Amino acid sequence: MTDQELIAKLNSLNKISPDQNWLKSNRELLLSQISNSGAEKLAVWKIILIDFSSALKSASQPVYALGVFVLLLVGSVFYSQQIFAQAKPNDSLYIARIISEKLKLNTTFNAQERDMLAVQFATSHAQDISTVLSDPQFNTEENKDQVEKLNHSFKEEVNTVKDRISRLPAKVKKAPVALLVATGSEVIIADNAKDGERIEIAEKAQPTLEATSSNLAASSSVKIENVESDANEANVILDEATKLFDSKDYTKASSKLKEVDEIIK
Amino acid sequence: MSLNLVEKFKDKQILSRLKNRDKEAFIKIYDENVEEIHRFVYFKIGNREEANDLTSMIFLKTWNYIQNKTLVDAKTLRALLYKISRTSIVDYYRENGSKMTVSLDDEDNNIDVIDETENPSERLDQQSNLALIKRMLPLLKEEYREVIIMKFINDLSLDEIADISGKTKGNIRVLLHRSLNALKELVEKERPL
C-alpha cells in the first residue's frame, strides 16, 4: 500500500459523523446552557453597529491609518482656523489659533492671497490685543508681564501688516495690464506682463476701438493708483492706531484697525 | 483582495458578536465545528457515547472561555476548540484511569458512515478499509494518532496543528511522516494477502 492510498483511506474517514438526533438534541441543550450563563439574542441595532465597526476594522490598517491622517489634515486646514478664530491672546487656545493660521498660510500657494491672508490675520491679532488690553480686569498690575508681552506683540503685528501691505501693490503693479493708446491712425499696445516689455503698433484704429482703448487705459491707471492710495491710506491708519495704542486708547486703536481690515478687503 | 476583506470582515463580526454574548453567533460556531470536534474526540477515545458527552462539554467550556478570557482573533477559534478538546480528553483519561488500547467502539455499537457512493462493491471496499483503519488506529502511539486525525481526517493545516499542539511546523512534518509509516506498517501486517 502506498502513502497516497493510505492517505486517501484516512481522508474517507472524515465522512464519519455523529448521530443526527444527538446533534439536534445537543444543540438545544447547549442553547439552554449558554442562555443560563448570560447569552442573549442581540438587538438588530446592536448587530448593525457590530457590522459597521467590523467593516471599519477589516479595512487594512495602513490604508485606514492613511485615510484618517488625510482626513485629519484636510479637516485641520479647513476647519481648525474657524474653530479657534474666537481664541483671544490671553486664552490657552490662542496658540492653537496661531498654529492653524500658520497652517492655512503655508497651504495657500498663491503669493498674493497669502499676503492678503497674512495682513488679515495680523490685523485681527492686533485688534484682539487691543480688545484684551482694554479689559480693566485683565490690564492690571498682576498681569504686568503679560501686558508687556502683548504690547510688544502689537508692535510686531502692526509691522507685519505694514510689511505685507507693502508687498501687495507691487504685485498688483506687475499683474498684466494692457495699455492701449490710440493715436490718429495707429493703435499702440503696451504690455508689461512680461520682462521684455513690448510695444505693438497696429494700423488704423476703428473709431469704436479708439473709445474703448482710451477707457481701458484710463481704468487701468485708476486701478493702480487706487491700490497704491489704499496702501498709503492703510499705512497712515496703522500709524494712527499705533499712536492711539501707545496712549492706551485701546478701543479707538481697535476701531482704526477695523478700518485697515476693511480697506484691505 | 476583496475575498480577503470579506473574510476579515466575517472574522471581526463573529468575534464582536461572541464578545457581546450573542448566542446565535455561538450556535453558528457550534454548527460549523461540532462534527469535526466530535470526530476528533471519537478517534481519540474510541467510544461514541463518551465522545458525545465530551463534545457537549467541550463547547460549553469554549463558551465560558470566550466570555472570561480575551480572544483576539476569530481565526483561533478552531484552534481553541481543539485545545479545549485535548485538555478535556486528558481529564477524561485521568478520571477513567485508562486509555483507548483495543479498538474504536465494539461491534454492536458501530458509528454511522454517511456513504455517498451507490456502487455496492465500492461501498464494501470502503467499509473494509474503514474497518481496517479503525482497528489499526488505536494501536498507534497517542501523538501519532493525534496528528493523523488532525491532518488526514479533519484536514487541518500544518500551521493549525503546530498551534494546537505547541510544536513547530518542522516537528509536525516529521511526526506526520513517522506516524504514516507506523500506520502503514500495521496495516500491511494485518492486510490479507
Image (spheres, rainbow, N blue to C red):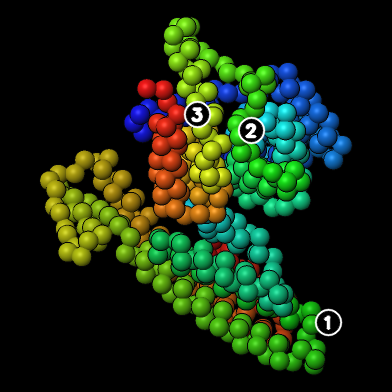
Residue at the disc numbered 3: B133
Residue at the disc numbered 2: B46
Q: Position of residue A91 (x, y in %)?
A: 72, 74
Amino acid type, callout 2: Gly
Q: Position of residue B93 (x, y in %)?
A: 70, 45
**Horizontal side, residue A81 vs residue A224: left or right:** right
In the rendered structure, are the residues bearing label 3 and label 1 in contact, judged by CB atoms less than 8 Å apart? no
Amino acid type, callout 1: Gln
Q: Quadrant of residue A123?
A: bottom right
Q: Under tag 2, what secondary structure?
A: loop
Mark 1 packing: few (<14 Cα in 10 Å), some, or many (20+)? few
**Horizontal side, residue B148 vs residue A189: left or right:** right
**Horizontal side, residue A103 vs residue B103: left or right:** left
Q: Residue at x 17, y 59 (%)?
A: A198
Q: Under tag 1, what secondary structure?
A: loop
The residues tagged by marks 3 and 2 sit, at their Cα atoms, a distance apart of 13 Å
Q: Is residue A128 above or below residue A27?
A: below
Q: Earlier in the sequence, mark 3 or mark 2?
A: 2
For the C terminus of chain A, give its image quadrant: bottom right
The residues tagged by marks 3 and 1 sit, at their Cα atoms, a distance apart of 95 Å
Q: Position of residue B68 (x, y in %)?
A: 76, 51
Front position among marks 1 and 2: 2
